[in-house]
Amino acid sequence: MGLILNLETSSTNCSVSIARNGKILAIRELNSANYSHAEKLHVFIEEVTQEACLKMEDLEAVAVSKGPGSYTGLRIGVSAAKGLCYALGIPLISIATLASMASQIVDRQNNMVIIPVLDARRMEVYSAVFDHEMNQIRETKAEIIDEHSFQDFLVEKQVHFVGSGAEKIKEVISTGSSLFHTDVVPSSKEMATLSFKKYKEQQFEDVAYFEPYYLKDFVLQTKKVANT
């Protein structure tokens, strides 16, 4: 039946949906700069389950956005997903955050590419590149944005920059062939189709060993203590 709970916590948007065969039955999300995941995630899970008139035992899989993105957000989402999979004895599915973002761009044409970009530190973004058929044509990486960024794609194609990092790119890249979708955030809505595809193909993660895709090592910032 393909009844899947989708969890998205990689950015400021805390988003939860339940879908059957890739079709959304219920969804809850809150995009807050304060990162509401710890407070809202389990509340949203309960609410979408109730709205869909289901019990947790009805679920056949849990899908989680695997990153890159917020270190803390990813930890919260993956921990919740793994806990549910353990408790219910169901498989875990991971969805690449940037692929999910790219899938939000519709009406694709042959001469376009989609570049999802998540804001990182300073002038850095997490990015990947997809063609109009959603094939990933450049690897996911963290990169510093300057006037030379993405030039290989800008020369020949119309480029859609998608996500919170698009604002940084807009400041340094000026070309008529670019469109900037700065309001796009990762969402469990787009995860539904992707997670169902993986469910049918039985592309499951090892619940015991799966970890988020942080892309970069987490750096803990600590205050310096003055010598006395």
Image: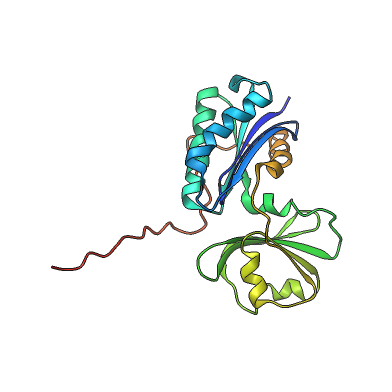
Q: Is residue 77 left or right of residue 114?
A: left
Quadrant of image for the N terminus: top right
The percent position of residue 92, horizontal first and vertical second, equals 58, 34
219 lies above or below 5: below
Name the residue at 70% across, 42% down: 189
The percent position of residue 217, horizontal first and vertical second, equals 44, 58
Name the residue at 64% across, 30% down: 48
97 lies above or below 141: above
Residue at the left extreme, as displayed: 228
Q: How many marks?
A: 0
Along the line of sight, the residue nearer the viewer: 172 or 208: 172
54 lies above or below 144: above
Quadrant of image for the C terminus: bottom left
The percent position of residue 46, horizontal first and vertical second, equals 57, 28
- Residue 149 visible in the current orientation: no
Along the line of sight, the residue nearer the viewer: 204 or 58: 58
Q: How is the image coloured?
A: rainbow
Q: Is residue 64 left or right of residue 218?
A: right
The answer to which image quadrant residue 22 occupies is top right
97 lies above or below 181: above
- Residue 53 visible in the current orientation: yes
Name the residue at 68% across, 57% down: 183
Name the residue at 54% across, 37% down: 41
Q: Is residue 86 left or right of residue 166?
A: left
